[in-house]
Image: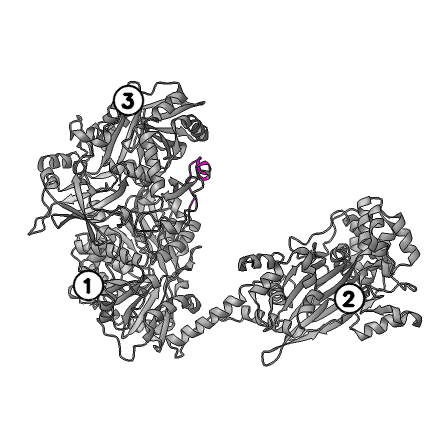
Amino acid sequence: AARMFLRLLSDIQWRAAHPKWRRMTSSQRSTSTTAEPHPVSLPAEAQVVICGGGIMGTSVAYHLSKMGWKDIVLLEQGRLAAGTTRFCAGIVSTARPVSIELKMAHYSNKLYQQLEQETGVQTGYMKTGSISLAQTQDRLISLKRIASSLNVMGIPCEIISPKKVVQLHPLINIHDLVGAMYVPEDALVSSANVSLALATAASRNGVQIHERTSVSHVTIQKGRVTGVETDRGWIQCQYFVNCAGQWAYELGHSGEEPVHIPLHACEHFYLLTHPLQEPLSSSIPTVVDPDGRIYIRNWQGGILSGGFEKNPKPLFTEGRNQLEIQNLQEDWDHFGPLLSALLRRMPGLEALQIMQLVNCPESFTPDMRCIMGESPTARGYFVLAGMNSAGISYGGGAGKYLAEWMVNGYPSENVWPLDLKRFGTLQSSRTFLRHRVMEVMPLMCDLKVPRWDFQTGRQLRTSPLYDRLDAQGARWMEKHGFERVKYFVPPGNDLLDLEHSKTFYKPDWFDIVGSEVKCCKEAVCVIDMSSFTKFEISSTGDQALESLQYLFSNDLDVPVGHVVHTGMLNEKGGYENDCSIARLSKRSFFMISPTDQQVHCWAWLKNRLPNDSNLTMEDVTWKYTALNLIGPRAVDVLSELSYAPMTAEHFPSLFCKEMSVGYANGIRVMSITHTGEPGFVLYIPIEYALHVYNEVMNMGQKYGIRNAGYYALRSLRIEKFFAFWGQDLDAFTTPMECGREFQVKLEKGMQFVGQEALLEQKQNGVYKRFTMFILEDHDTDMDLWPWWGEPIFRNGRYVGKTTSSAYSYTLERHVCLGFVHHFDEKTGEELVVTTDFINQGEYEIDIAGQRFQAKAKLYPFSSLFTQRRRKDEMELSGYQRE
Amino acid sequence: FYLTPPQVNSILKANEYSFKVPEFDGKNVSSILGFDSNQLPANAPIEDRRSAATCLQTRGMLLGVFDGHAGCACAQAVSERLFYYIAVSLLPHETLLEIENAVESGRALLPILQWHKHPNDYFSKEASKLYFNSLRTYWQELIDLNSGETTDVREALINAFKRLDNDISLEAQVGDPNSFLNYLVLRVAFSGATACVAHVDGVDLHIANTGDSRAMLGVQEEDGSWSAVNLSYDHNAQNEHEVERVKMEHPKSEEKSLVKQDRLLGLLMPFRAFGDVKFKWSIELQKRVIESGPDQLNDNEYTKFIPPNYHTPPYLTAEPEVIHHKLRPQDKFLVLATDGLWETMHRQDVARIVGEYLTGVHHEQPIAVGGYKVTLGQMHGLLTERRARISSVFEDQNAATHLIRHAVGNNEFGTVDHERLSKMLSLPEELARMYRDDITIIVVQFNSHVI
């Protein structure tokens, strides 16, 4: 299987197959100093070997060499920039909904703009601007949300009327448009030439580039990359970068130890035409019509137009060699709907003569975001691939972040949304990928409303209670392959259909979740939280305690039976993970982390725990079903079921005890609920799950028990100002910045990771502050709902973005959580954020261009806790303290 | 109320079956690409049957439609048994010996037929032993008769038809100790069935027909248009030769009573059929068998009723008329169908509809611009036209289903009218038979490249 990567077709065949295309992109080839086949023999060793000579590989090489790494070899199985990069449409667009992707695209644009000057290679860079069209009001809202993000980043952008559209681009038929977004600085490039320019610069900086060299596999020993086997010999290396594009999956699987890179190729079609009668101006803006699923750009006076059809054609599921790429057929019948959309948008093009229909495969990922970072199992094995057809937009920025990651240990921005470790082996099934990318590709153009879920690749990981809950009206969402309940549709009310929930406004589950929240506040609810990642760490002696004390910021040397909330911090004090750890015995600990931490946290700990056979770590996620009993009557239900007193004197907050529930023994009960409400989480060995659930539901009946879902949980935790890792907290946020100093024991008598950084922050203050905002003049029924990523304005100036939001049924207001920065008014420099700075501002939250007044708070409402029992205040007391 | 298009489709497609012949079976390149078949009931239960099988000990493939009357028992038995009789009739002497020796010594039998059945096409488990014994007696006689000559397909077909009908008659006369089987063989004999069977071996196509089902060849003319060639003659009152034949076989005194109201003895539409012992046995034999038969038979007025003017039986035969045709490249397909289809559609229309359907499926080439000058507008028009054509054609994946859709749903303009289709399919059971008959269709597609 190692020989999957067959040699590319000879150049002569290539020429014959695509003569026109070749003329268009290859004019610069002669100026490239790197294109000679096999100029020298391969070196025996190198610091870094990059596989893939497309935009990603060359960008990584370019940035690594700029950052001072010189001993780099780039291998390309065919010719540079000959794969997807050659075919790609060359649109550099910053209009991206995800903030980190927007930043990558912005950087790419700036990089490409000066690349020609820097390298002398013509890149075809042309600042044309782009117009994104909206055929519906919902589409316009989604464009406005992007426009808000662009504006606060200083990227020019405006929402324009259809009339303005036709002024910018006279060919556009505007009769069905409600508006558009204009981004004047978006650009076009020749992507192959950008790639060649990056390669040229890298090569001047000392990077060795070898074409026609195939990597067969990467050798890994003791969890580290040791070298690369190629068809021209072995290269010893410390770092390997997999930039093999759509072949990245296969390459990852070619070695003895597989590296799972979940991506899958789909055919992608675009049309090239001869020039118009009156050729298009080279500065005419690129048009994106997401409702028509198409994009249209100028191409040599004619047009280049492609799109993302509803019925994509996945390919290479079985894994094939690249030979087939050039033989991919044009499929006009398949392209038909997109052609209709094109002629509807630009009826004047009827008489335009077709040149070619290009079939250019693109690779897509399970969540529509690209894949970068280091393998969780093989250190030194880096990946940059799966661009979801935006490779040229992301190329510059993605290459930069990956280079920073390799050189500095982490990029300069939070790239968790793109981190390879967000996936595990479970997303690596070919069937899963094939089905998921068939959903993902149309989604490129579909409207993305808050809380949308993927429909394919579902019901993979489920709790043993899945069928029971489903039968009771559960509606599901998925996290890391695990099905989790959103809410329960009450019987007789199940006309609730998916279409209705697709809204930027008040969703139709509003009252359903409201009643679940009410039940949590007044009686008791059960939420199945089995998806949480669970590790057990134990040792024969004190090794476990000592290692954990070093890796976690809170003091874990607590009496047996105590539960500690703590961050797992990096050297800069940022949260790599936020978890609860129970001390089961002197020498063993039970660790609960967010669902999507399963791979990341495992890798982080594995790489840092001492290699000691007396110290063991086990992933027990699958062994336990977790039931969260939330509410004031949880205590009653549990004490009746266990014949054990559960009151605060016997079972204080943040405690963990093994006890019997019903007939089942050995249930780990913890007095935490992840919401700030009173209650318990039951960790139940899975074979007892159904029994315990039945017992709890039967016993709970007289206390008004009911099922609840994650939406209720979210509303509860956000109104209590609880931050969640992955949503509010990331590797760039420290406990000091989110009011959690109480979860850090700076003086626990030993050093821990991040301590220095935290001490410094304690001394000098923080540069951002996690803040809670209560929307004041927001009408829940009529106004757009906040989601996350909304800009925050203080006294009219941008200070940060929200990270999560929810409607608080208690406050009857929307609550947004987010970070406030303090930018110097003149220089833009970041200044220390003080409590006074937060408290002395007038705040507004920008939802799709509309600003709502907001009240900022650094502490949760104490009024929400007045009716609470004493024991619950212990869990929350930390917040009052600071 | 109307059925929705998906409801209509689920009714039309409930019995559809397709079989693709493997391009190369290891021995021969088949002249048949495959066949589509389907049935739409009007009677409840349906009285039509269909069969398809590949001969394993000789070359060739057998396909047939069977239209039962006075119940489905006879059609069911014929659909199970006839192909075995034909296959055995075609077997060379050595193979027959081999089979007989295998049975004798309890060894595994050489498989004779490979059936291609829809899940709804069932075989009677209870009667299999009885049927097998009759078949064995037949091949033992064939072995004894050993003529040494190579078997002629025409003769084999005629012998098989006649022999099976004879066995049906004998089994009913002999009876069976098992009361269920006893009743079954009587029901088979007292009901009737027509049969239209095709044997295809390379370019040699034989049609053996008994009754009023029909075989029709679809021929593509040089200009691409479609025409129909009949490969069978209906055995009914509309066929002068058939009326003539019946009259020849009986005394002149019966001339007037033989065919009345276009029916044999004023009762039976088909002039040839399997079973129907009421038209074959003497009155004495009929009475004896019915009296000694089970009560159910005695209670049945139809079986007890003796046809009027019944003087010189038999009036009916199962002997088929066999037509041999050498396939030509322009012969694209063969349609075998029971009279339910032919009552509603002219063969010329059948030829056109199937022809266009089959070429639509197989000749929609992908478009390539190549070096031609094509504008976006022209391409768009072309694609729209193709989509429209495809959507109407591809509603059906099966040529037989497509034909039934037309047969039931065609309006006066010859196009399928959903409203009409919906009405016809939603008729209550008791009314359905008044508006349409059971329809059974097999469409066999030939491989012109081989022919």
**Amino acid type for the residue under numbered disc 1:** Glu
Q: Determine which of the numbered discs, if any, sits on residue A740 in the image.
A: none
Left or right placement of residue A797 versus residue A395 in this view: left
- Furthest residue to the left? A826
- What main secondary structure does the magenta stretch of the protein show? loop
**Amino acid type for the residue under numbered disc 2:** Gly
> Magenta region: which residues?
A457-470
Mark 3 surroundings within 10 Å by alpha-carbon count, few (fewer than 14), some (14 through 19), many (20 or more):
some
Chain name for mark 3 = A
Dot 1 or dot 3, earlier in sequence: 1
**Amino acid type for the residue under numbered disc 3:** Pro
Compared with residue A15, is residue A442 higher up or lower down, i.e. above or below?
above
Near-viewer residue (B56 or B392): B392
Compared with residue A409, is residue A657 higher up or lower down, i.e. above or below?
above
- Distance in Å between CA atoms under marks 1 and 2: 81 Å
Q: Nearer the viewer, mark 1 or mark 2?
A: 2
Q: Determine which of the numbered discs, if any, sits on residue A652 in the image.
A: 3
Q: Secondary structure at mark 1?
A: loop
